[in-house]
Image: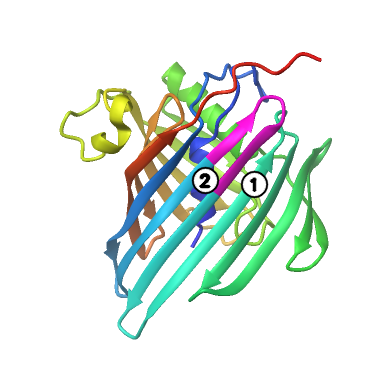
Amino acid sequence: MRATRLAFHAVLLPAVFSVGPAFAVPALQAHRAVYDLTLKKADDRSGITGITGRMVYEFNGSACEGYTVKFRFVTQIATSDNTKLTDQQTTTFEDAEGKTFSFVTKSFVDQNLDKEVKGVATKETKGLKVDIDKPEKSSLELAATQFPTQHLVELIDKAEKGENFYQTNLFDGSEDANKVMSTTVVVGKRTDADKADPEAPALAKLATDKYWPVDIAYFDDSAKNGEETPEYRISFKLHENGITRDLTMDYGDFSMTGKLVNLSLFDQTKACPTK
Protein backbone atom coordinates (compact mmCIF):
# COMPACT_ATOMS: atom_id res chain seq x y z
CA MET A 1 0.00 0.00 0.00
CA ARG A 2 1.16 3.51 -0.73
CA ALA A 3 0.95 4.70 2.86
CA THR A 4 3.96 7.01 2.68
CA ARG A 5 2.08 9.19 0.22
CA LEU A 6 0.06 10.46 3.21
CA ALA A 7 3.05 11.74 5.09
CA PHE A 8 3.42 15.01 3.18
CA HIS A 9 0.07 16.36 4.35
CA ALA A 10 1.20 17.66 7.71
CA VAL A 11 4.72 19.07 7.38
CA LEU A 12 5.95 22.04 9.40
CA LEU A 13 7.56 24.91 7.48
CA PRO A 14 8.94 28.20 8.82
CA ALA A 15 7.10 31.41 8.03
CA VAL A 16 10.12 32.75 6.14
CA PHE A 17 10.45 29.70 3.89
CA SER A 18 9.57 30.04 0.22
CA VAL A 19 9.83 27.72 -2.75
CA GLY A 20 9.29 28.00 -6.46
CA PRO A 21 6.97 30.95 -7.09
CA ALA A 22 7.56 32.61 -3.72
CA PHE A 23 4.75 31.08 -1.70
CA ALA A 24 4.10 32.88 1.59
CA VAL A 25 3.98 30.07 4.14
CA PRO A 26 2.07 30.46 7.40
CA ALA A 27 3.54 29.15 10.65
CA LEU A 28 2.33 25.57 10.77
CA GLN A 29 2.13 23.35 13.81
CA ALA A 30 4.71 20.70 14.65
CA HIS A 31 2.81 17.72 16.03
CA ARG A 32 2.23 14.02 16.47
CA ALA A 33 -1.05 12.71 15.09
CA VAL A 34 -2.56 9.26 15.59
CA TYR A 35 -5.30 7.87 13.32
CA ASP A 36 -7.41 4.74 13.61
CA LEU A 37 -7.79 2.93 10.29
CA THR A 38 -10.82 0.95 9.13
CA LEU A 39 -12.04 -0.55 5.88
CA LYS A 40 -14.56 1.67 4.08
CA LYS A 41 -15.39 -0.54 1.10
CA ALA A 42 -13.92 -3.38 -0.95
CA ASP A 43 -15.03 -5.04 -4.15
CA ASP A 44 -14.71 -8.72 -4.99
CA ARG A 45 -11.48 -8.18 -6.95
CA SER A 46 -9.62 -7.03 -3.85
CA GLY A 47 -10.34 -10.21 -1.90
CA ILE A 48 -10.36 -8.08 1.25
CA THR A 49 -12.98 -8.72 3.91
CA GLY A 50 -11.68 -6.41 6.62
CA ILE A 51 -8.98 -3.88 7.54
CA THR A 52 -8.10 -2.43 10.93
CA GLY A 53 -4.99 -0.53 11.91
CA ARG A 54 -3.31 2.62 13.11
CA MET A 55 -1.27 5.37 11.50
CA VAL A 56 1.13 7.61 13.44
CA TYR A 57 2.70 10.74 11.96
CA GLU A 58 5.32 12.79 13.80
CA PHE A 59 7.15 15.91 12.69
CA ASN A 60 10.20 17.56 14.24
CA GLY A 61 12.53 20.18 12.85
CA SER A 62 13.50 23.79 12.50
CA ALA A 63 14.18 26.41 9.86
CA CYS A 64 17.88 26.09 10.68
CA GLU A 65 18.34 22.34 10.56
CA GLY A 66 15.62 21.07 8.22
CA TYR A 67 12.61 18.87 8.80
CA THR A 68 12.33 15.26 9.90
CA VAL A 69 9.16 13.19 9.53
CA LYS A 70 8.61 9.82 11.17
CA PHE A 71 5.67 7.88 9.86
CA ARG A 72 4.29 4.46 10.75
CA PHE A 73 1.38 2.66 9.10
CA VAL A 74 0.23 -0.65 10.62
CA THR A 75 -2.70 -2.63 9.22
CA GLN A 76 -4.23 -6.04 9.77
CA ILE A 77 -5.76 -7.15 6.49
CA ALA A 78 -8.27 -9.99 6.46
CA THR A 79 -9.18 -11.99 3.36
CA SER A 80 -11.34 -15.07 2.93
CA ASP A 81 -8.17 -17.18 3.20
CA ASN A 82 -6.03 -15.57 5.89
CA THR A 83 -5.05 -12.48 7.89
CA LYS A 84 -1.88 -10.51 7.23
CA LEU A 85 -0.17 -7.91 9.42
CA THR A 86 1.69 -5.16 7.53
CA ASP A 87 3.91 -2.56 9.16
CA GLN A 88 5.47 0.28 7.17
CA GLN A 89 7.99 2.56 8.92
CA THR A 90 9.30 5.63 7.12
CA THR A 91 11.71 8.40 8.11
CA THR A 92 12.42 11.35 5.81
CA PHE A 93 14.53 14.49 6.02
CA GLU A 94 14.10 17.54 3.81
CA ASP A 95 16.54 20.41 4.05
CA ALA A 96 15.17 23.85 4.85
CA GLU A 97 15.68 25.05 1.28
CA GLY A 98 13.91 22.09 -0.29
CA LYS A 99 16.93 21.03 -2.36
CA THR A 100 17.62 17.57 -0.92
CA PHE A 101 15.33 14.85 0.39
CA SER A 102 16.54 11.69 2.12
CA PHE A 103 14.29 8.75 2.86
CA VAL A 104 14.27 5.27 4.32
CA THR A 105 11.27 2.94 4.40
CA LYS A 106 11.13 -0.50 6.02
CA SER A 107 8.16 -2.71 5.22
CA PHE A 108 7.34 -5.71 7.41
CA VAL A 109 4.85 -8.50 6.77
CA ASP A 110 3.86 -10.56 9.80
CA GLN A 111 6.79 -8.97 11.67
CA ASN A 112 9.35 -10.11 9.07
CA LEU A 113 11.27 -7.52 7.05
CA ASP A 114 9.92 -7.66 3.52
CA LYS A 115 11.61 -4.67 1.90
CA GLU A 116 13.85 -1.69 2.67
CA VAL A 117 14.27 1.33 0.41
CA LYS A 118 16.84 3.99 1.28
CA GLY A 119 18.20 6.90 -0.72
CA VAL A 120 18.69 10.61 -1.31
CA ALA A 121 17.10 12.82 -3.96
CA THR A 122 18.84 16.03 -5.02
CA LYS A 123 17.54 18.81 -7.22
CA GLU A 124 19.83 19.63 -10.11
CA THR A 125 19.69 22.13 -12.96
CA LYS A 126 17.93 19.82 -15.40
CA GLY A 127 15.86 17.72 -13.03
CA LEU A 128 16.06 15.38 -10.07
CA LYS A 129 18.88 12.95 -9.29
CA VAL A 130 18.04 10.00 -7.03
CA ASP A 131 20.83 7.96 -5.45
CA ILE A 132 19.49 4.73 -3.96
CA ASP A 133 21.49 2.75 -1.36
CA LYS A 134 18.96 -0.03 -0.67
CA PRO A 135 17.77 -2.55 -1.72
CA GLU A 136 20.79 -2.14 -4.02
CA LYS A 137 22.93 0.78 -5.10
CA SER A 138 21.70 2.62 -8.18
CA SER A 139 21.22 6.11 -9.55
CA LEU A 140 18.58 7.57 -11.81
CA GLU A 141 17.49 10.87 -13.31
CA LEU A 142 13.88 12.02 -13.05
CA ALA A 143 11.93 15.05 -14.17
CA ALA A 144 12.04 18.25 -12.14
CA THR A 145 9.53 18.07 -9.31
CA GLN A 146 8.64 19.06 -5.78
CA PHE A 147 9.32 17.35 -2.47
CA PRO A 148 6.55 16.79 0.10
CA THR A 149 7.06 20.05 2.01
CA GLN A 150 6.86 22.06 -1.19
CA HIS A 151 3.76 20.18 -2.29
CA LEU A 152 2.05 21.21 0.95
CA VAL A 153 3.29 24.79 0.63
CA GLU A 154 1.64 25.01 -2.76
CA LEU A 155 -1.58 23.45 -1.48
CA ILE A 156 -1.90 25.90 1.43
CA ASP A 157 -1.09 28.83 -0.86
CA LYS A 158 -3.75 27.80 -3.40
CA ALA A 159 -6.33 27.21 -0.69
CA GLU A 160 -5.70 30.61 0.90
CA LYS A 161 -6.16 32.27 -2.51
CA GLY A 162 -9.41 30.45 -3.15
CA GLU A 163 -8.07 28.42 -6.09
CA ASN A 164 -10.01 25.17 -6.12
CA PHE A 165 -8.35 23.13 -8.88
CA TYR A 166 -4.76 22.72 -10.05
CA GLN A 167 -2.22 20.12 -11.19
CA THR A 168 1.30 19.63 -9.93
CA ASN A 169 3.82 16.84 -9.25
CA LEU A 170 5.59 15.14 -6.39
CA PHE A 171 8.53 12.95 -5.43
CA ASP A 172 8.30 11.46 -1.92
CA GLY A 173 10.56 8.41 -2.02
CA SER A 174 7.70 5.94 -1.59
CA GLU A 175 7.50 2.43 -3.04
CA ASP A 176 10.69 1.95 -5.13
CA ALA A 177 11.61 5.67 -5.17
CA ASN A 178 11.90 5.52 -8.94
CA LYS A 179 9.19 7.85 -10.24
CA VAL A 180 7.57 11.24 -10.05
CA MET A 181 3.82 11.29 -9.53
CA SER A 182 1.48 13.81 -11.15
CA THR A 183 -1.25 15.05 -8.86
CA THR A 184 -4.61 16.67 -9.51
CA VAL A 185 -5.77 18.66 -6.51
CA VAL A 186 -9.32 19.81 -5.75
CA VAL A 187 -9.80 22.21 -2.83
CA GLY A 188 -13.29 22.89 -1.49
CA LYS A 189 -14.65 26.00 0.18
CA ARG A 190 -13.32 26.75 3.62
CA THR A 191 -15.75 25.24 6.09
CA ASP A 192 -16.82 26.06 9.65
CA ALA A 193 -16.21 23.51 12.38
CA ASP A 194 -19.04 21.17 13.32
CA LYS A 195 -19.71 20.90 17.05
CA ALA A 196 -20.82 17.29 16.55
CA ASP A 197 -17.61 16.34 14.73
CA PRO A 198 -16.46 12.94 16.09
CA GLU A 199 -12.80 14.05 15.80
CA ALA A 200 -13.38 17.13 17.97
CA PRO A 201 -12.19 15.49 21.22
CA ALA A 202 -8.81 14.69 19.65
CA LEU A 203 -8.53 18.20 18.20
CA ALA A 204 -9.16 19.79 21.64
CA LYS A 205 -8.55 23.55 21.32
CA LEU A 206 -8.33 23.25 17.53
CA ALA A 207 -11.85 21.82 17.29
CA THR A 208 -13.34 25.22 16.41
CA ASP A 209 -10.90 25.92 13.58
CA LYS A 210 -12.12 26.14 10.00
CA TYR A 211 -10.78 23.70 7.42
CA TRP A 212 -10.66 23.00 3.67
CA PRO A 213 -11.94 19.72 2.21
CA VAL A 214 -9.22 18.46 -0.15
CA ASP A 215 -9.09 15.64 -2.71
CA ILE A 216 -5.84 14.62 -4.41
CA ALA A 217 -5.60 12.08 -7.25
CA TYR A 218 -2.20 10.53 -8.07
CA PHE A 219 -1.15 9.50 -11.57
CA ASP A 220 1.95 7.59 -12.65
CA ASP A 221 3.47 9.51 -15.56
CA SER A 222 5.83 6.64 -16.32
CA ALA A 223 2.92 4.32 -17.13
CA LYS A 224 2.44 4.84 -20.86
CA ASN A 225 -0.94 3.19 -21.06
CA GLY A 226 -2.93 6.20 -22.20
CA GLU A 227 -5.37 5.84 -19.33
CA GLU A 228 -6.43 8.77 -17.18
CA THR A 229 -7.48 6.70 -14.18
CA PRO A 230 -5.52 7.61 -11.02
CA GLU A 231 -3.51 4.95 -9.24
CA TYR A 232 -5.17 6.09 -6.04
CA ARG A 233 -6.67 9.16 -4.40
CA ILE A 234 -6.74 10.69 -0.93
CA SER A 235 -9.40 12.95 0.59
CA PHE A 236 -9.02 14.81 3.88
CA LYS A 237 -9.79 17.91 5.90
CA LEU A 238 -6.91 20.39 6.00
CA HIS A 239 -6.47 23.00 8.73
CA GLU A 240 -4.48 26.14 7.99
CA ASN A 241 -1.81 25.06 10.49
CA GLY A 242 -1.11 21.86 8.53
CA ILE A 243 -3.14 19.43 10.63
CA THR A 244 -5.00 16.89 8.48
CA ARG A 245 -7.81 14.57 9.51
CA ASP A 246 -10.88 12.64 8.40
CA LEU A 247 -8.82 10.78 5.80
CA THR A 248 -10.16 8.57 3.04
CA MET A 249 -7.59 6.54 1.07
CA ASP A 250 -9.04 5.06 -2.12
CA TYR A 251 -6.94 2.44 -3.95
CA GLY A 252 -9.56 1.61 -6.57
CA ASP A 253 -10.73 -1.85 -5.58
CA PHE A 254 -10.79 -0.96 -1.88
CA SER A 255 -10.67 2.10 0.36
CA MET A 256 -10.09 2.84 4.03
CA THR A 257 -10.66 5.70 6.44
CA GLY A 258 -8.33 7.30 8.96
CA LYS A 259 -9.94 9.07 11.91
CA LEU A 260 -7.88 11.32 14.19
CA VAL A 261 -7.90 9.90 17.74
CA ASN A 262 -4.96 11.66 19.38
CA LEU A 263 -3.05 14.86 18.70
CA SER A 264 0.03 16.19 20.50
CA LEU A 265 1.24 19.70 19.70
CA PHE A 266 4.98 20.38 19.94
CA ASP A 267 6.71 23.61 20.88
CA GLN A 268 7.52 25.80 17.88
CA THR A 269 11.00 27.00 16.99
CA LYS A 270 10.64 30.79 17.00
CA ALA A 271 13.87 31.81 15.28
CA CYS A 272 17.25 30.52 14.21
CA PRO A 273 20.10 31.34 16.56
CA THR A 274 22.36 34.12 15.34
CA LYS A 275 25.95 33.28 14.57
* Label annotation for residue 92: 1
Residue 8 figure quarter: top right
Please tell me whether mark 1 sits on a helix, a strand or a loop: strand
Within 10 Å of disc 2 (Cα), the crowding (few <14, some 14-19, many 20+) is many
Magenta-colored span = 59-70
In the rendered image, residue 263 lying in the magenta stretch gets the answer no
Query: Percent x, y for residue 102?
Result: 71, 47
Q: Magenta-highlighted stretch: main secondary structure?
A: strand
Q: CA distance from mark 1 to mark 2?
A: 9 Å
In the rendered image, residue 66 lying in the magenta stretch gets the answer yes
Counting labels gives: 2
Q: Which residue is drawn at the image coordinates 32% and 26% (left, top)?
A: 206
| Kind of residue at disc 2 | Ala
Residue closer to the observer: 158 or 106: 106
Query: Percent x, y for residue 41?
Result: 27, 62
| Kind of residue at disc 1 | Thr
Query: Percent x, y for residue 20?
Result: 68, 25
Within 10 Å of disc 1 (Cα), the crowding (few <14, some 14-19, many 20+) is many
Give the quarter of the figure containing the C terminus. top right
Q: Contact (CB < 8 A) between labels 1 and 2?
A: yes
Q: Is residue 30 left or right of residue 116?
A: left
Most distant residue in the left direction: 196
Residue closer to the observer: 3 or 29: 29
* Label annotation for residue 7: 2
Query: Percent x, y for residue 187?
Result: 39, 31
